[in-house]
Image: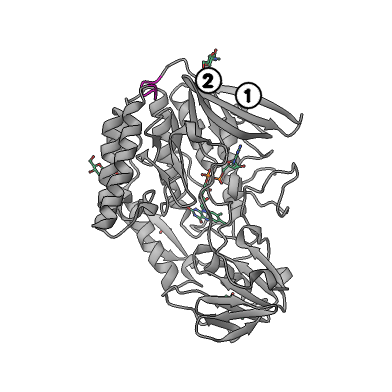
Amino acid sequence: MAKLSLVFCVVLCLLNLVIEVTNGLAVPRSSGRTCIIGAGISGLATAKYLQDYGVTNFTVFEATRHIGGTWRFDPHVGVDEDGLPLYTSQYKYLRTNTPRETMEFEEFPFPEGTPSYPSGTCYYKYLKLFTKNYDLYKYIQFRSHVRSVRWNKDRWSLSYHNTETQSDEVASCDYVVLCSGHYSKPRWPKFEGAEAFKGSMIHSHDYKEPEPYRNRRVLLLGAGPSGLDLATHLVNVTQKLVHSHHLVYNQPNFPKNYVKKPDIRAFTTDGVIFVDGSFEQVDDVIFCTGFDFDYPFLDETSGVTVSGKFVLPVYQDIVNIRRPSMMFIGLTQVTITRVLLSQGEYAAAAIAGKFKLPPQEQMLKHWLSKVYYLDSIGKKIVNVNLIGNLQDQYFGNLTSEAGVKRAPPVLTEIRDFNAQIRLDDLLHYRDYDFNITDAFHYDRYYHPVDPNNVPCPIDIDF
Ligand SMILES: Cc1cc2nc3c(=O)[nH]c(=O)nc-3n(C[C@H](O)[C@H](O)[C@H](O)COP(=O)(O)OP(=O)(O)OC[C@H]3O[C@@H](n4cnc5c(N)ncnc54)[C@H](O)[C@@H]3O)c2cc1C
Ligand SMILES: *[C@@H]1O[C@H](CO)[C@@H](O)[C@H](O)[C@H]1NC(C)=O
Ligand SMILES: *[C@@H]1O[C@H](CO)[C@@H](O)[C@H](O)[C@H]1NC(C)=O
Ligand SMILES: *[C@@H]1O[C@H](CO)[C@@H](O)[C@H](O)[C@H]1NC(C)=O
Ligand SMILES: *[C@@H]1O[C@H](CO)[C@@H](O)[C@H](O)[C@H]1NC(C)=O
């Protein structure tokens, strides 16, 4: 109950803020300019659907020289070729951990013969092919690092740094669509003694390949998607692999050099003490502790509250309720990539005037009902961008409100199955392909491929 009243307080304060605001622009201006930030899959999807709706007055501001966001492998560590923070967390030998059937555009599927779990490189090629196929390059302004987005009277003022000319520029935007991703700002838990540790210590964001860890004693921290994946990549390379986590799952029969440990109590100069009092000497540590939301270019004029774990209040996890001319793509947690594509279509439909967003009070009420629902299932305000089990309902809602293509329920079926089988059969779940037979059903059949040479029938120059 205490929790709920806290929620109430937060919400009432927000409600006041919203009611004060009258210039939030819910009615699209047909002649307006749209600024998209980021040319990863979210930005590319938004661009594609804007173009489909006949809207061409838009620019995609991309910090790097490349499309593809986190799917592009970059050998740099720390900063990239232009001195920017690295926005990709891609590493060698990565294969998707969700079937590509849940990650592709319905109107632009992977070529026949692509396995359900392609390599990261293959997914990057797919995005390049997509961008070329829909002629989207002409909308993308590369080397444009957005540094500030401010509400200025009746529109957004976007400032960016051009890394080619080293000049600072300003653009004026009627709509801003934020597609800057949220898997590149490392979350670093604090541990006693961490500064005293003499070995190497990195976050999975900076992990590139197994080779540097050959014959070393390595500590992996965490068993989220990165922690589990790196365990399988490293166990046959390291002298010893110490894995500290508290995930309950069907641990594979790893070789004897794999040691499972509970949570960490503290670091020493040459090793780690765990909460059960045991100690392990290690040479290297990799923190697989996830990522924080980060919108460093937003300030208080945006009207949203951003923390490392959530952004609020955001209607449908897309529309900034206080300033509806700002939209977020890819904010939702624990969803399939297809959700990002539907969100891009929704944003494009709103901007194109294909439907009208509800009044702010109604958007806030809808948002509140989600907060109450999450509260009723024991989730907290930090989980406010979670879709989880409501994914199929969410797809349905985006369709009924904005007319976006309805993602078939089978995709959510596959997602649910995949989430479980990853934990039941970590080493072999990718040895199967999916075949979608109708909107509700799929087959899954055994079709192993060489993990170091996964077929990718996409021919495109890099
Ligand atoms: C290692 C890893 C593995 C993953 N595997 C899977 C998987 O198997 N299946 C799955 O469904 N999902 C996976 N994901 C999630 C993945 O993030 C999404 O699939 C998707 O790529 C997110 O796309 P995005 O366009 O929202 O963000 P991103 O791909 O991160 O793209 C954001 C873009 O914005 C640009 N940008 C950022 N800040 C600025 C700025 N200030 N100015 C200008 N441009 C900016 C960046 O340069 C980048 O190009 C994985 C993520 C990681 C990190
Ligand atoms: C794009 O929209 C802006 C209004 O924000 C307008 O000034 C500009 O002329 C438009 N450009 C085109 C090509 O329509
Ligand atoms: C490690 O190598 C063994 C022997 O080649 C192999 O059977 C096993 O699948 C490998 N483990 C992983 C996680 O790759
Ligand atoms: C879908 O819409 C209904 C009706 O507005 C709402 O009650 C429900 O919470 C929405 N579900 C999601 C996942 O947004
Ligand atoms: C996939 O399903 C279709 C029917 O929808 C079928 O014709 C095809 O043979 C199946 N493919 C495989 C590889 O099982």
The residue sitting at 50% across, 63% down in the picture is 225
Tell me if 281 is positioned left or right of 404 in this view: right
Residue 419 in magenta stretch: no
Tell me if 194 is positioned left or right of 352 in this view: right
**Magenta stretch, residue numbers:** 23-28
The residue sitting at 38% across, 27% down in the picture is 350
Q: Amino acid at mark 1?
A: Val
Question: Mark 1 highlights which residue?
Answer: 170
Question: Crowdedness of circle 2 by 10 Å Cα count: few (<14), some, many (20+)?
Answer: some
> Looking at the picture, how far across and down is residue 433, in whole percent?
45, 61
> Looking at the picture, how far across and down is residue 422, in whole percent?
44, 67
How is colour applied across the structure in the image?
A: one colour
> Looking at the picture, how far across and down is residue 87, in whole percent?
62, 47
Q: Residue 461 sits in which quadrant?
A: top right
> Looking at the picture, how far across and down is residue 110, in whole percent?
51, 47
Q: Name the foreground residue: 116 vs 344.
A: 344
Label 2 secondary element: loop
Tell me if 383 is positioned left or right of 193 in this view: left
Q: Name the foreground residue: 238 vs 201.
A: 201
Question: Mark 2 highlights which residue?
Answer: 57
